Amino acid sequence: MWRFTKRTAIDGKYHPTFADFRAAVQDVLDRIPTNHADKLASLMTLKFQEFEDVSLLAA
């Protein structure tokens, strides 16, 4: 998700202030259900790695 957002809002674009940067990122996130749905759907998969019998305290 971040890679898509970064490529769409940030790559090759100059944002003179942090507020402009933040607005660009927010704009991409706001448009995900409409403008970017097809592009993002092709990148997101339902293949997640699952772990069984893992101790949460084994760090």
Image: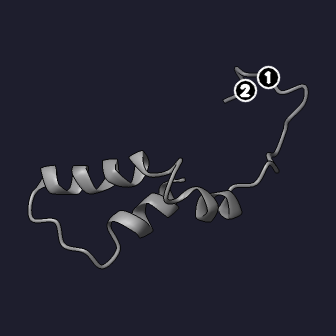
Where residue 27 appears, as percent x and y from the top left, is 33, 52
Residue at 67% from the left image edge and 57% from the top image edge: 41
Where residue 24 appears, as percent x and y from the top left, is 27, 57
Give the numbered dot on residue 55. 1
Give residue 55's quadrant in the image.
top right
Between 56 and 3, the one nearer to me in the picture? 3
Between 56 and 11, the one nearer to me in the picture? 11
54 vs 4, left or right, is right
The amino acid type, in three-letter code, at marker 1 is Ser
- Mark 2 and mark 1: Cα distance apart in space: 6 Å
- The colour scheme used to paint the residues is one colour
Residue at 32% from the left image edge and 47% from the top image edge: 26
Label 1 CA crowd tier, 10 Å (few <14, some 14–19, many 20+): few
Q: SS for tag 1?
A: loop
Question: Does 4 appear above or below 49?
Answer: below
The quarter of the image holding the C terminus is: top right
Residue at 41% from the left image edge and 67% from the top image edge: 8
Where residue 36 appears, as percent x and y from the top left, is 52, 59
- Labels in figure, total: 2
Which residue reaches farthest bottom? 12
Which residue bears the numbered disc 2?
Answer: 58
Label 2 CA crowd tier, 10 Å (few <14, some 14–19, many 20+): few
Q: SS for tag 2?
A: loop
Question: Does 26 appear above or below 42?
Answer: above
Give the numbered dot on residue 22. none
Where residue 10 appears, as percent x and y from the top left, is 32, 67
Give residue 50's quadrant in the image.
top right
46 vs 29, left or right, is right
Residues at circles 2 and 1 in contact by the CB criterion of under 8 Å: yes
The amino acid type, in three-letter code, at marker 2 is Ala
23 vs 43, left or right, is left
Between 47 and 55, the one nearer to me in the picture? 47
